[in-house]
C-alpha cells in the first residue's frame, strides 16, 4: 500500500503539479492569442514578446520596490508590481495597434499581412527587451520559496517520496483561476464582453447592431495586455525570467490555442492543459513509478521514457499537426485557419 | 421629400466591376417598398449600399433629408436604421437572448419591454431564449434575425429575403405585426 | 626605382622601432557568453604576468609585451575564428593566450592558428579531444584534460562513499568529454552511473530533465555543466522537486555566483576544480589581490600561460611562434631552476645567460603528453553558502 502511495506522490510531484502550473501559464498565454485571433482575425506572433515585455516591466518595478525595502513576504514582491506592468503593457499593445495593425486593418489587408507585421513587432520587442534588461537569467521570486517542500513532506508523512509545492505554483494556480473566472464573467455577463463575442462571431452583423469596432478592438488589446503581463510574470516567477525563453514559448502557446480551437477562450484553456500534460507525461521517465508498483525482480532496466526531454517542444508540434489534420477546428470548434 | 433615398448609387465589391449602376431607390415614411428581381440582380447589394457596407463610387444616400453617405454602418444604426441581411444574420455562438441584447446594443434604456414585445411576436424564441442561435432551425433563425433588428425600435427596417425558410403562417403574422 | 627603394627603406625605418619594441600577445577568451563571469579575472591573470615582465625591462633586450584582447564568446566557433583571424592579421599578435572553452579553442586552432603558425596556450580548454588533435606542435594548455578531472572526481565520489550517481552534462564538447571520462573512471572503480543525460543551456525550465534524472535515481547528481546556465537550472529544479539534495560539481560549476544564487541548500555539495597548494599558488594569490582582481578559477593557469609564452620567447631568442614552440616544454619542465610567480625576471635572466629553468608558476605547471598540464586539483566543499577548500590532490 505504501508503495502505491509513493507511486502516486511521485506522479503528483514530478508530473501533475508541474503540468498543472505549466498548463495554467500556457492557458493564459493562449487566451491572449485566441482573443486577438477572434476579434482581429490574425495570429499574433508578437504575443510571446508581449508577455516578456509585461514581465520585464514588473521586474523593473520589483527591483525598485526592493530597493525601497518594500516587501509582502511570504508573497513575492513582484505581485505588487503587476498593476504597473499591466498598465505599461496595455499601453504598448494600444500603441502597436495604433501604429501598425490599424493601418493594415483599414487597408482590409488579408490576415497573413497582419501576421507578418506581428512577426516584425515580435523581433522589435525582443530586441528592445534585450536592450533594456539584458539577456541574462533573472530570479523573480522572493519571499517564501515553498508552501511545503519535499523534505518536510517526507518527514511529515514518513513516505520515501517527497512532494514539493512551491509558492510560485500556488500563486500561478490561484491567479489563473481568478483571472479566468473574471474573464469569463466579463465575456458572458457584461455588455462590453458580449459585444466582443458578437464581433468575433459575425463582424458585419455586429456593425449592423451598432457595435463600435474601434471600441471592441481597444477592449481586446486591454484584455490581451492584462493576460500577457500576468502570464509572463507567472512564468518568470515559477521558472526564471529570461528574454530568450519567450521565443521558444510561442510554439506551445499557439499549439494550445489551435488545439483548443482558435478564437474560443474555453478552448484556449483546455488546449493549454492538453499541451502541458502531453509534454510532461510523454517526456516523463516512468521507471521509478513502475518500480514501486511491480515486485522487485520485475524492476525495469530502462528509464521507460517515451521521448527524451530534448524533444519536449516537438510534442506540441506533433499534437498541433495531428489536430490540424484530423480536426482543424480544434477541440472546441474554433475558426478554421 | 422622401424619408430614405439612395440616389444614383454606383459601386461594386472591392475593386471589382460595378454591380450597381446609377441605381436610385426612394421610400416614404410609412411606406412599404419591395425590391424584386432575379437571383443575382443586385438586390442585396443595393441594400448593403444603403447601409454603408459597400463603398459607393458615385451617388449618395439620404435619410430624412440628411446626407449619410459617409457614415459607418454602426452610425446609421444610431440614426434609426435597421437591417436584416440575407445570410449570416444571427450570432450563431450566442444565445437567442444575447442576440436580442446585441440588437439593442446602442440603447442605454431598459430593453426588457422591447424584448417582451419580440417574444410576444415570436413565442418560440422565448422558449429557446437560452439556446445558441446556431442550434436553431432556419426559420427560427430568421425570427431571431428579425427580432434582433427590431430591438433598436428602428424607424426604417430593411429585410433581405425575410420570408426565406419561414412558414407562411408565421410570415403572415410577422408582417401583420411589423406593420 | 631608386627613389622608391629609398622611400621604402625610410618607411621601414620609421616602422621598425615600434615593431622592434613591442611584442603583441593575444588574450583571446570568452568575455561574453556562458563563462563571462570568469574571463575578466582570467585576462587579468595573463596580463599580470605581462606587466611583471614589462616592469622588469621586457624580454629579448628590452622589448615590451602588449596584450590584445579578443572575444571567443565561449560557444560561437565562427565568432572565435573571426576574432583570432583579425588579431593575427591586423593586430599582428605573435602568440595567443587562449581560447577558453574547448569547442571554440579547437576551432581557433584548426581554422586559424595552424594555418598561420601561431602558438596557442589555453588556460582552460579541458576537452580530452584536444590531447590528440594534430597541432604542428603549436598547441599547449596549462589546464589539464577533463579525462584527468574525471578520474579525480571519480576518486572523490568513491571516498565519499557514493555507490550510484546520476549524471547530466551540458550538450557540447566540454560536457560530453567530461561526462564520458567521469563515467568511465567511476565505473572502473566500482561505482554505477544510473543515467548520463545531456541538457541544453539557455532553457527556462529544467523540471522535465530533472524528472528523468530522478527516475533513474542515485545518491548524488553530478552536474557537468555551467554555473551561469543550465547547470544552475538543473540544480534549482532538483532542489525544488526534492529529486536530489547533494551535487557533485566539476570545474564549470565552481564559482561564487552559484552558492549565491542557490542559497544554503547547496551546502554539503562538493566538487573539483583545477588548483594547487604549491607555494606558487599562494604567491599568486597575493599578487592577484595586489593587482586588483580575484584569484578565481583558471586565473593562475592564465598567468602561467602568458608566462610560458614569454619565457619560451626568451629561450628561443625570438618572438616568432615557429621558433618559440620548441622551447615551451623545455622551460616548463625539469631540469633547471624552479621559477615561481613574481620571479619571471629571474627566469628570463637565467635563460638569457644560457641556463635552464623549470617553470612551476602559479598552478605547479608540469607539461605532459603533447604539451598539457598534468593537473593539480582542489577538492571543494560548499559550506555556509561559500566554496571552501577541502584538500588538494
Ligand atoms: N461579396 C461579394 N463580392 C463580390 N461580388 C459579389 C458579392 N456578393 C454578391 N456579388 C455579386 O453581385 C451580384 C449581385 O448579387 P446580389 O447578392 O446583390 O444579388 P441578389 O439580387 O440579392 O440575388 P438573390 O436573389 O440571389 O439574393 C452577383 O453577380 C454576385 O455575384
Ligand atoms: Mg440577395
Image: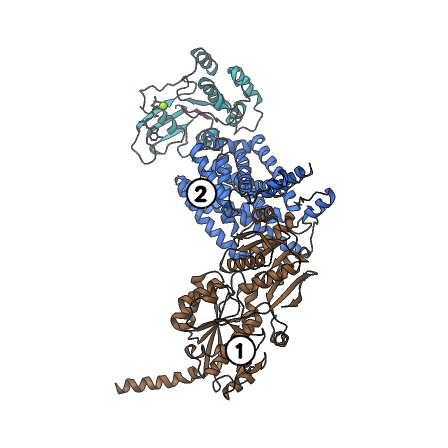
Instruction: Give the prevailing secondary structure in the magenta stretch.
Output: loop
Please state if C380 lies on the left or on the right of A157 as rendered. left
Which residue reaches farthest left? C1
- Tell which chain the image draws in blue: A
Q: Which residue is mark 1?
A: C333
Judge by depth and name the residue closer to the eye, C123 or C48: C123
Residue at figure coordinates x 58%, y 74% from the top left: C364
Please tell me the numbered disc located at residue A102. Answer: 2
Magenta range is: B81-90
Tell me the CA gap for discs 2 and 1: 73 Å
Please state if A289 lies on the left or on the right of B35 as rendered. right
- Location of the N terminus of chain C by quadrant is bottom left
Residue A30: where, in percent of width, then height?
52, 40
Q: Is mark 2 within 8 Å of ligand 1?
A: no
Judge by depth and name the residue closer to the eye, C167 or C87: C167
Q: Secondary structure at mark 1?
A: loop
Q: Chain C, which colour?
A: brown
Q: Secondary structure at mark 2?
A: helix
Please determine whether, in this image, residue C35 is positioned above or below residue A187.
below
Inspect the magenta stretch and tell me whether residue B87 lies in it: yes
Residue at figure coordinates x 70%, y 50% from the top left: A73
Pointers 2 and 1 within a single chain: no
- Tell which chain the image draws in cyan: B
Please determine whether, in this image, residue C245 is positioned above or below residue B157.
below
Please tell me the numbered disc located at residue C200. Answer: none
Q: Quadrant of ligand 1?
A: top left
Which residue reaches farthest bottom? C353
Residue A205 appears in which quarter of the rendering?
top left
Mark 1, Cα crowd under 10 Å, few <14 / some 14-19 / many 20+, is: some
Please determine whether, in this image, residue B172 is positioned above or below residue A65.
above
Amino acid at each position: 500500500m505504501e508503495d502505491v502511495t509513493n507511486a502516486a506522490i511521485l506522479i503528483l510531484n514530478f508530473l501533475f503539479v508541474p503540468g498543472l502550473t505549466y498548463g495554467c501559464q500556457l492557458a493564459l498565454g493562449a487566451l491572449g492569442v485566441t482573443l486577438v485571433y477572434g476579434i482581429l482575425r490574425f495570429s499574433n506572433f508578437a504575443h510571446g514578446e508581449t508577455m516578456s515585455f509585461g514581465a520585464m516591466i514588473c521586474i523593473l518595478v520589483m527591483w525598485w520596490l526592493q530597493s525601497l525595502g518594500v516587501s509582502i513576504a511570504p508573497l513575492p514582491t513582484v505581485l505588487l508590481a503587476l498593476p504597473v506592468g499591466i498598465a505599461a503593457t496595455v499601453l504598448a499593445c494600444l500603441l502597436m495597434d495604433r501604429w501598425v495593425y490599424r493601418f493594415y486593418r483599414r487597408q482590409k489587408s488579408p490576415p497573413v499581412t497582419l501576421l507578418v507585421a506581428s512577426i516584425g513587432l515580435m523581433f522589435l520587442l525582443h530586441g528592445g527587451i534585450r536592450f533594456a534588461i539584458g539577456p541574462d537569467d533573472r530570479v523573480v521570486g522572493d519571499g517564501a520559496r515553498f508552501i511545503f517542500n519535499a523534505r518536510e513532506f517526507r518527514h511529515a508523512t514518513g513516505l520515501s517520496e517527497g512532494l514539493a509545492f512551491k509558492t510560485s505554483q500556488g500563486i500561478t494556480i490561484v491567479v489563473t483561476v481568478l483571472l479566468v473566472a473574471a474573464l469569463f464573467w466579463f465575456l458572458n455577463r457584461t455588455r462590453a464582453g458580449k459585444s466582443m463575442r458578437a464581433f468575433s462571431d459575425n463582424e458585419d452583423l455586429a456593425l449592423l447592431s451598432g457595435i463600435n469596432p474601434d471600441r471592441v478592438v481597444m477592449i481586446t488589446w486591454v484584455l490581451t495586455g492584462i493576460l500577457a503581463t500576468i502570464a509572463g510574470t507567472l512564468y518568470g516567477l515559477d521558472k526564471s525570467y529570461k528574454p530568450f525563453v519567450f521565443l521558444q514559448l510561442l510554439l506551445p502557446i499557439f499549439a494550445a490555442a489551435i488545439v483548443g480551437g482558435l478564437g474560443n477562450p474555453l478552448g484556449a484553456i483546455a488546449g493549454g492543459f492538453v499541451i502541458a500534460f502531453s509534454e510532461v507525461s510523454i517526456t516523463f521517465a516512468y521507471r521509478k513509478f513502475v518500480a514501486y508498483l511491480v515486485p522487485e525482480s520485475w524492476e525495469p532496466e530502462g528509464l521507460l521514457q517515451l521521448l527524451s526531454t530534448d524533444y519536449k517542444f516537438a510534442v506540441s508540434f506533433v499534437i498541433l499537426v495531428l489536430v490540424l489534420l484530423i480536426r482543424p477546428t480544434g477541440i472546441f470548434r474554433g475558426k478554421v485557419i | 421629400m422622401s424619408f430614405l433615398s439612395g440616389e444614383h448609387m454606383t459601386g461594386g465589391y472591392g475593386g471589382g466591376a460595378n454591380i450597381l449602376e446609377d441605381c436610385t431607390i426612394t421610400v416614404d415614411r410609412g411606406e412599404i417598398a419591395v425590391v424584386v428581381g432575379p437571383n443575382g440582380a443586385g438586390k442585396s447589394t443595393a441594400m448593403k449600399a444603403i447601409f454603408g457596407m459597400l463603398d459607393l463610387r458615385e451617388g449618395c444616400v439620404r435619410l430624412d433629408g440628411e446626407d449619410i453617405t459617409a457614415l459607418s454602418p454602426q452610425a446609421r444604426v444610431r440614426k434609426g436604421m435597421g437591417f436584416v441581411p440575407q445570410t449570416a444574420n444571427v450570432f450563431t455562438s450566442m444565445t437567442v437572448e444575447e442576440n436580442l441584447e446585441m440588437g439593442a446594443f446602442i440603447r442605454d434604456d431598459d430593453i426588457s419591454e422591447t424584448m417582451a414585445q419580440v417574444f410576444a411576436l415570436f413565442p418560440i424564441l422565448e422558449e429557446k431564449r437560452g439556446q445558441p442561435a446556431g442550434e436553431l432551425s432556419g426559420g427560427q433563425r430568421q425570427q431571431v434575425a428579425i427580432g434582433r433588428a427590431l430591438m433598436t425600435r428602428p424607424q426604417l427596417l430593411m429585410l433581405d429575403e425575410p420570408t426565406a425558410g419561414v412558414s407562411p403562417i408565421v410570415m403572415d403574422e410577422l408582417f401583420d405585426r411589423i406593420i | 626605382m631608386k627613389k622608391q627603394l629609398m622611400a621604402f627603406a625610410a618607411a621601414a625605418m620609421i616602422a621598425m622601432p615600434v615593431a622592434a619594441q613591442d611584442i603583441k600577445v593575444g588574450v583571446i577568451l570568452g568575455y561574453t557568453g556562458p563563462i563571462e563571469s570568469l574571463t575578466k579575472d582570467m585576462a587579468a591573470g595573463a596580463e599580470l604576468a605581462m606587466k611583471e615582465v614589462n616592469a622588469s625591462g621586457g624580454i629579448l633586450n628590452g622589448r615590451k609585451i602588449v596584450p590584445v584582447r579578443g572575444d571567443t564568446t565561449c560557444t560561437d566557433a565562427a565568432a572565435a575564428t573571426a576574432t583570432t583571424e583579425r588579431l593575427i592579421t591586423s593586430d599582428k599578435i605573435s602568440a595567443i593566450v587562449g581560447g577558453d572553452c574547448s569547442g571554440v579553442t579547437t576551432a581557433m586552432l584548426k581554422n586559424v592558428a595552424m594555418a598561420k603558425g601561431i602558438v596557442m596556450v589555453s588556460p582552460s580548454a579541458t576537452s580530452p579531444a584536444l590531447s590528440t588533435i594534430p597541432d604542428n606542435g603549436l598547441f599547449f594548455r596549462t589546464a589539464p584534460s577533463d579525462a584527468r578531472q574525471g578520474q579525480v572526481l571519480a576518486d572523490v565520489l568513491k571516498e565519499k562513499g557514493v555507490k550510484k550517481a546520476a549524471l547530466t552534462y551540458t550538450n557540447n564538447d566540454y560536457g560530453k568529454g567530461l561526462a564520458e571520462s567521469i563515467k568511465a573512471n567511476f565505473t572502473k572503480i566500482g561505482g554505477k552511473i544510473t543515467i548520463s543525460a545531456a541538457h541544453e543551456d539557455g532553457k527556462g525550465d529544467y523540471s522535465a530533465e530533472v524528472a528523468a534524472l530522478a527516475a533513474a535515481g542515485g545518491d548524488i547528481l553530478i552536474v557537468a555543466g555551467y554555473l551561469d546556465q543550465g547547470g544552475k537550472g538543473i540544480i534549482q529544479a532538483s532542489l525544488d522537486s526534492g529529486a536530489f539534495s547533494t551535487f557533485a560539481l566539476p570545474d564549470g560549476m565552481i564559482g561564487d555566483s552559484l552558492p549565491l544564487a542557490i542559497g544554503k541548500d547547496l551546502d554539503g555539495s562538493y566538487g573539483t576544480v583545477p588548483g594547487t597548494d604549491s607555494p606558487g599558488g599562494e604567491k599568486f594569490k597575493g599578487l592577484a589581490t595586489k593587482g586588483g582582481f580575484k584569484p578565481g578559477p583558471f586565473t593562475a593557469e592564465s598567468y602561467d600561460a602568458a608566462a610560458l609564452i614569454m619565457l619560451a620567447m626568451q629561450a628561443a631568442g625570438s618572438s616568432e611562434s615557429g621558433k618559440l614552440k620548441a622551447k615551451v616544454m623545455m622551460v616548463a619542465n625539469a631540469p633547471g631552476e624552479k621559477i615561481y610567480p613574481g620571479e619571471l625576471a629571474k627566469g628570463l635572466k637565467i635563460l638569457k645567460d644560457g641556463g635552464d629553468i623549470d617553470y612551476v608558476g602559479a598552478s605547479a605547471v608540469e607539461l605532459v603528453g603533447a604539451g598539457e598540464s598534468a593537473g593539480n586539483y582542489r577538492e571543494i566543499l560548499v559550506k555556509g553558502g561559500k566554496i571552501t577548500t577541502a584538500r588538494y590532490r
